Amino acid sequence: MGYTPRLKEEYKERVMKALTEEFGYQNVMQVPKLERIVVSRGVGAAVADKKLIEYSVDELTRITGQRAVATISKKDVASFKLRKGMPIGAKVTLRGERMYEFLDRLITSALPNVRDFQGIKATGFDGRGNYSLGITEQIIFPEVDIDKVKKIEGMNITFVTSAETDKEAKSLLTELGLPFKKN
């Protein structure tokens, strides 16, 4: 039998039962699940220096454990000296085993490294059951070597769920272990 991430087993054994009791689902297929996690970063200074994109892609690859891709601009913006097709950021889409592994590392080792951490804000829901979280420093991840960091940069982490409402999505993410602030 192969390896199964800790959070995936916990979802199947504990989280599904808790959500079924809370919302009264009739079928296990109605229980919301985490579909994917997208980690992205915009690198505005890459217009002047192309090496910044490569560095950002390498850093996201190290953090997530999956190869990141450079994102390109969709249109020209003269005031930013930006042309269509220029690399402007980096992103990674995690699914399956790697998604659960990244979430586990985020909850257990990265978020506790944030200075004066009191929990994450519950205002990042989009109305369709997805949650976005902004991180201001990449050095909270243990995979990042602080001596090799050229510039402190942030990133956006989006949790895409199959939940229909924000309340269901928040319950799912709370059960999985995301530490939301107490209001």
Image: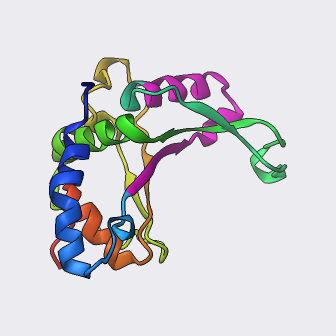
Magenta range is: 34-61
Q: Residue at x 31, y 77 (%)?
A: 26
Residue 107 placement, left or right of 165: left
Q: Is residue 132 shown above or below 138?
A: below
**Can residue 36 be spotted in the picture?**
yes
The foreground one among 157 and 87 is 157
Q: Is residue 23 shown above or below 155?
A: below
Q: Which residue is drawn at 28% across and 34% down?
A: 141
Q: Which residue is drawn at 23% across and 73% down?
A: 20
The foreground one among 144 and 104 is 104
Percent position of residue 181, x then y:
19, 69
Q: Residue at x 25, y 27 (%)?
A: 3
Residue 74 placement, left or right of 175: right
**Can residue 120 be spotted in the picture?**
no
Percent position of residue 55, x then y:
52, 23
Q: Is residue 158 shown above or below 123?
A: above
Residue 81 placement, left or right of 166: right
- Whether residue 39 is in magenta: the answer is yes
The foreground one among 131 and 98 is 98
Q: Name the image quarter holding the N terminus.
A: top left
Percent position of residue 12, x then y:
23, 52
Residue 180 figure quarter:
bottom left
Q: How many labels does the image show?
A: 0
The foreground one among 166 and 19 is 19
Percent position of residue 70, x then y:
63, 33
Q: Which coloring applies here?
A: rainbow
